[in-house]
Amino acid sequence: MSLLSEAFEKSTLMNFIRQSDGRGGYDEYWQDGAEIMIAYSFDSSTEARIAEKNGVHVRHNLVTDKSILLQYHDVVRRESDKQYFRITSKSNDMKTPVSSPLNIRQYDAEEWELSGEVREENNG
């Protein structure tokens, strides 16, 4: 087992659901989606610390297998502490080349708080 694979943590991709409430409005909520493995690291760069002092959310770098394609503004939950993160980069911005022995993709993310409720799949 490599040091990188030991860093991966169980995580859940969150799905945002918006459906008609039957009264002319919408019912919006979050629901657990796919389980994925992510390695998290805190961005302690000077630029990140300056941005945080200027009101930007706490920054993190997330690393996944290259086959995991997260989209800009996708939300994931780290299962160890139930912390949510919102993706702030595009999936093709930072990935290893085909010739690399590493098979990873890196994302920028910020700590996030969900607005609205999280529902179990069968409690619609």
Image (cartoon, rainbow, N blue to C red):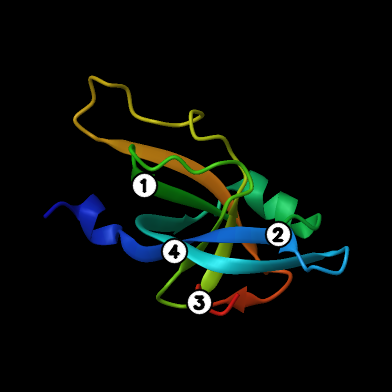
Amino acid carrying label 2: it is Arg
Q: Earlier in the sequence, mark 3 or mark 4?
A: 4
Amino acid carrying label 3: it is Asn
CB within 8 Å, label 2 to label 1? no
Residue at label 2?
Answer: 18
Compared with 2, 83 (above or below) is below
Amino acid carrying label 4: it is Thr
Q: Is residue 18 left or right of residue 79?
A: right
Q: Which residue is at the front of the view, 52 or 97?
A: 97
Q: Earlier in the sequence, mark 4 or mark 1?
A: 4
Compared with 18, 116 (above or below) is below
Task: Measure the C-alpha gap from mark 3 to mark 4.
Answer: 17 Å
Task: Measure the C-alpha gap from mark 4 to mark 1.
Answer: 12 Å
Residue at label 3?
Answer: 122
Residue at label 4?
Answer: 12
CB within 8 Å, label 3 to label 2? no
Look at the numbered disc 4 and give the secondary structure of its residue. strand
Question: What is the quadrant of residue 44 in the picture?
Answer: bottom right
Residue pictured at 58% horizontal, 50% vertical:
74
Residue 81 % position (x, y): 46, 78
Quadrant in which the N terminus is drawn = bottom left
| Residue lying farthest to the right in this orientation | 24
Q: Is residue 54 left or right of residue 59?
A: right
Residue pictured at 86% horizontal, 69% vertical:
23
Question: What is the quadrant of residue 106 in the picture?
Answer: top left
Look at the numbered disc 2 and give the secondary structure of its residue. strand
Residue pictured at 56% horizontal, 80% vertical:
123
Compared with 90, 57 (above or below) is below
Q: Residues within 10 Å of mark 3 (few under 14, many from 20)?
A: few
Residue at label 1?
Answer: 64
Q: Residues within 10 Å of mark 1 (few under 14, many from 20)?
A: many
Q: Earlier in the sequence, mark 1 or mark 3?
A: 1
